[in-house]
Amino acid sequence: MTRMALPSRIVIPVANPLTAQELVRIGASLLDKRGSLTVLGIVEVPEGTPLSEGATRARQARRLLQRLLDFAPEGVTIHPIVRIGRRAAEGVIEAATELDADLIVFGWGGKPSPARAGRDATVFSPTIDEVVRDSPCDIAVIKQGGGESVAKRILVPIRGGPHAELALRFADSLARRTDGEVVALHLIPSGVTDGIRAQAERALAHFIRQHADGHVEQAVREATNVRNAILREAEEADIVVMGASAMPADGGKSFLFGALPEAIAARSRKTVIVVKTRDAIGKSTFEQLEQKAETLAAAERAAIESQTVPLRVERWFGESNFHHREFGDLGRLV
């Protein structure tokens, strides 16, 4: 299996210069050694107003972006560019397409914009949401926490699939740049057998060997509530890197990263990086993985089935446990 390459062209839209330094630092840690970063400033000009009216604000934006050059780690090239357009999302998508970007890195403040009604409710912000839906490349949304600025312990909750592969690859790169450690977390249902746990541990070890270069600690934990379990584990980490969930079968327009990673990003007090590949990953991807030996999807299916069998047996026993009087009239019983 071919290992995912690190991105060589990363675009970082900068909306808040105060948080841009951390975005540049993380972006540089995810970058291929021969790659480059582009910090992007977007100047929005309302409909009906000539685009040339944005010239003054564009000059101001360029001056702000120039300051970010000082944040570049040694050996990393940063290109500041400014785009003028009607809507920020269109500007980001156009710039990423023109630059043939591999990854767009967004910063997010942690609180979604006021929700719009119905299925179009905002998850992160109108701009981020729109770019995620129509992105020409992979996406990472970073919610900055208030903890350590250096990632010494990086938690990666893993179920399997391409989004999780990207998350582990990024976490591995971050850890190698900061001399940190990666903990790959896989959750299984409570009360499974030793055999089921061992299968999950083998599958997680196989996943790590495929998608990480450095040492990764593996952790298989039992949990009844996946979200709460991840949030508890996150308290011991500096950064959480998490892949998107599989897209639902109906391909709903409101789907971005999925309810679980969005909830972790919103609720955790730590820095959370949620990642998504450019390709939509649906349920069929996991169904195919379930058929392959040593995959986490196969281990998860075995864990679920191990719990349903006792329930079926218990139900059968309850439904088939007749009282001796019921055999008095065999015709009625049959």
Image: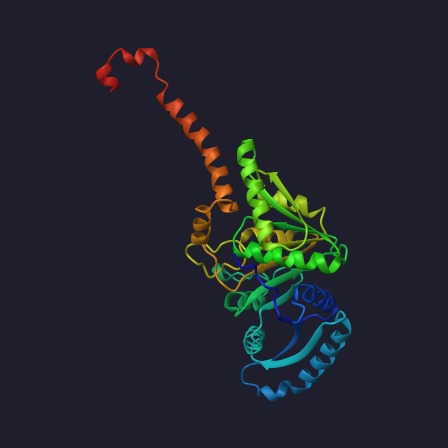
Asked if 319 appears above or below 152 in the picture, the reply is above
As rendered, which of 84 and 75 lies closer to the eye?
75
Q: Residue 256 at what x, y percent from top left?
A: 53, 60
Q: Nearer the viewer, residue 83 or 103?
A: 103
Position above or below: 28 against 196? below
Q: Residue furthest left?
A: 331
| Place of residue 89 in the rendered image (x, y in percent of width and height, measured from the top left) | 56, 72
Q: How many marks?
A: 0
Q: Position of residue 276 (x, y in %)?
A: 55, 60
- Quadrant holding the C terminus: top left
User: Going 45% across and 29% down the picture, which residue do you hit?
Assistant: 310
Q: Residue at x 46, y 61 (%)?
A: 253
Is residue 189 at least partly visible in the picture?
no
Q: Is residue 100 above or below residue 327?
A: below
Q: Position of residue 110 (x, y in %)?
A: 66, 59
Q: Is residue 288 visible?
A: yes
The residue positioned 54% from the left and 39% from the top of the image is 199
The picture quadrant where one finds residue 175 is: bottom right
Residue at 45% of width from left, 55% of height from top? 282
**Going by the image, does 121 lie left or right of 169?**
left
Residue 225: which quarter of the image?
top right
Color style of the picture: rainbow
